[in-house]
Amino acid sequence: MNLKQSLVAFLAGLALAAGGAAYAQRPPVTVIEGSIETSANQVIFPSSLAGKVSVLGGQSLQLGPGTQFTAGGRLVSLADIAAYARGAGSAPLTIHYRLKDSVVSRITILGK
């Protein structure tokens, strides 16, 4: 190995060591939220935030006062997203929920 190759190998080793040290100083990753991806016609919405949203053939998740609803790129109410879902057919719908208590943080339906 010549001097140039030795220098390149040394610098590469330093870079790896520095990167490893920085990585070791990061806090551990904690997953706090899960999600369900389905289509709008596979979800049943409750009439109030005290109810649960149900995925056909799957699970039911509790809504809460902080649950946000987005339909077609706009923040909407529970009643509005339920109506939007009825007309959205197989449009993609995502439900995000906290893993610790299965309370829904947000529901999003992408366009019709």
Image (cartoon, rainbow, N blue to C red):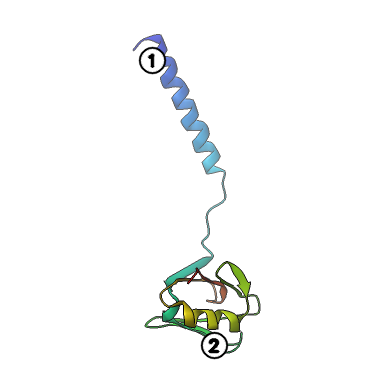
The numbered dot on residue 5 is 1
Task: Tell me which amino acid carries mark 2.
Answer: Pro
Image location (x, y in percent) of residue 21: 53, 37
- Mark 2 to mark 1: distance in Å? 67 Å
Image location (x, y in percent) of residue 33: 52, 66
Task: Tell me which amino acid carries mark 1.
Answer: Gln
The residue where tag 2 is placed is 46
Residue positioned most to the bottom: 47
Residue positioned most to the left: 1
Work out whether 112 lies above or below 1. Answer: below
Image location (x, y in percent) of residue 106: 57, 71
The numbered dot on residue 108 is none
Observer-nearest of 111 and 93: 111
* Quarter holding residue 73: bottom right
Secondary element under disc 1, as helix, strand or loop, is helix
Secondary element under disc 2, as helix, strand or loop, is loop
Observer-nearest of 13 and 84: 84
